[in-house]
Amino acid sequence: MNTASSSSNSWTVRLGWEHTHREMLAALIFLHLVEQRGNRWSLEHVEELVATSSDPEILFIPFYYDEQDLEKYLFRGDLRGKWLVNLAFEQMHFACGRSYLLPDGRFARDEMVHCAWGDRFRNLLIEHGIPPERIRMTGHPRFDIYSHPELLYTRAELAAQFGLDPERMWILVPHNFNFAFVSKQLIQQLAARRYHVTDEFVEGVRLARDAFKEMVDELADAFPDAELILRVHPAGYEDESHYRNGLQNKRRITAIAQYDIANWITQAALTIVWNSTSAMEAMVAGRPVVSYEPFPFAERFDFDVNRIVPTFSRKDDLFEVVGSLPDPKLTYDWELFEQWYRYRDGRNLERLADVVREAQTSPESFASRTKGVGLKGSLRRLRRPPEAAHAPPARPLAEAVRSLSARPLEQFLR
């Protein structure tokens, strides 16, 4: 447990996280604000995030889908009087996942507060039965990273660590092909929780993955002076080894999974996505971004990223954009962007910290009434705590939060 100077009205803020690269920098900003406001805090893996004391606490959970999550993550401890906040990390989504991703059950409706990044998700929550008074419009936490360049590595530092040429043009290609690697068993488990992954959906992901491999290879040949950086999604089932084996003879194509993707977005002359929401971060960062969709997919499965950023189905058109760098004259659908993401003012994590202040000033208004949650026997036997290596070391973490710098956690974040 990390502490800040206490006051008569201080609360313990417990922040659950799952994926280091994806969440840590935003967490540092948030916990820095929490500490400045005089609250105790802890950063814990989501599988260890439990109410453990009788002191006032607010628990931030990265996601909550249904009462299986209640049983899996919150079964220990007495939740009465605690505020439970669903950060809802997956808000822009394919329509086939909506009935899974929107929180279900009495507990979600009656005993949690839910964060929305924009009006689109807020309206979906309300249509799904979440009371409007239990929704807070906070904005996307990750967008604030781009207002804190001190959290990111410099171009020279990144180049030195990964053997890149800082004088060359860097092109970032985030990979987002998780469903090309998932097992039949996992698909069945998702289907049981109403994520409707069809064979057509999976085949579309596989086709896109293979087309991206081909596109990157041809891009390297067409632009030999560029550094191509392949970024594998940290929250999934693909791994950089799937791509690294084919890159041995390609000097200027590098698969890099280390560090937060914000480091690479801010240094890239262009980011090329399939349908990754990293595109939305590039827009906020003011960096050029496009989508390459070689086969129809986003329209078929209702995904807005490819409607917001310029999307190309032909490699020649995409390569024309690359050839026009550093000034590609791209236009974006900011109106649709703002339906999903209302704020890009660098104050989203302040809004999240305001939820803590609301809990302090009106503790009974949305506190949980659940005395304790009993985990089903079969799930209890299957549950395993995360490896100790998942936890950031306490002293460097406290220093990183206090100084608002990622440097004390460098080895952990790699």
Image (cartoon, rainbow, N blue to C red):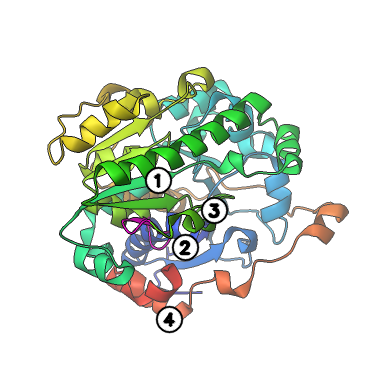
Residue at coordinates 26% horizontally, 71% vertically from top-left? 160
Q: Mark 1 sits on what residue?
A: 174
In this image, 333 relative to 64: left or right?
A: left
The residue tagged with tag 1: helix, strand or loop?
strand
Which of the two discs, 2 and 1, labels the residue nearer the N terminus? Answer: 2
Whole-angstrom CA distance, mark 3 to mark 4, is: 35 Å
- The question of residue 210 being in magenta is answered with no
Whole-angstrom CA distance, mark 2 to mark 4, is: 21 Å
Whole-angstrom CA distance, mark 3 to mark 2, is: 45 Å
Q: Alpha-carbon neighbours of circle 4 within 10 Å: few (<14), some, or many (≥20)?
A: few
Q: Mark 2 sits on what residue?
A: 11
Looking at the magenta stretch, what is its main secondary structure?
Answer: loop
What span is colored magenta in the figure?
A: 250-260
Q: Alpha-carbon neighbours of circle 1 within 10 Å: few (<14), some, or many (≥20)?
A: many
In this image, 270 relative to 91: left or right?
A: left
The residue tagged with tag 2: helix, strand or loop?
loop
Q: Mark 4 sits on what residue?
A: 395
Please, what is the three-letter code of the amino acid marked with disc 2?
A: Trp
Residue at coordinates 38% horizontally, 26% vertically from top-left? 306
Whole-angstrom CA distance, mark 4 to mark 1, is: 32 Å
Contact, CB < 8 Å: mark 4 with mark 1? Answer: no
In this image, 401 relative to 126: left or right?
A: left
Which of the two discs, 4 and 1, labels the residue nearer the N terminus? Answer: 1
Q: Given this view, does label 1 or label 3 mark the residue nearer the observer?
A: 3
Residue at far bottom of view: 395
Residue at coordinates 47% horizontally, 24% vertically from top-left? 295
Which mark, residue 242? 3
Q: Is residue 282 visible?
A: yes
Name the one closer to the observer, 362 or 27. 27
Q: Position of residue 335 (x, y in %)?
A: 28, 22
The residue tagged with tag 4: helix, strand or loop?
helix
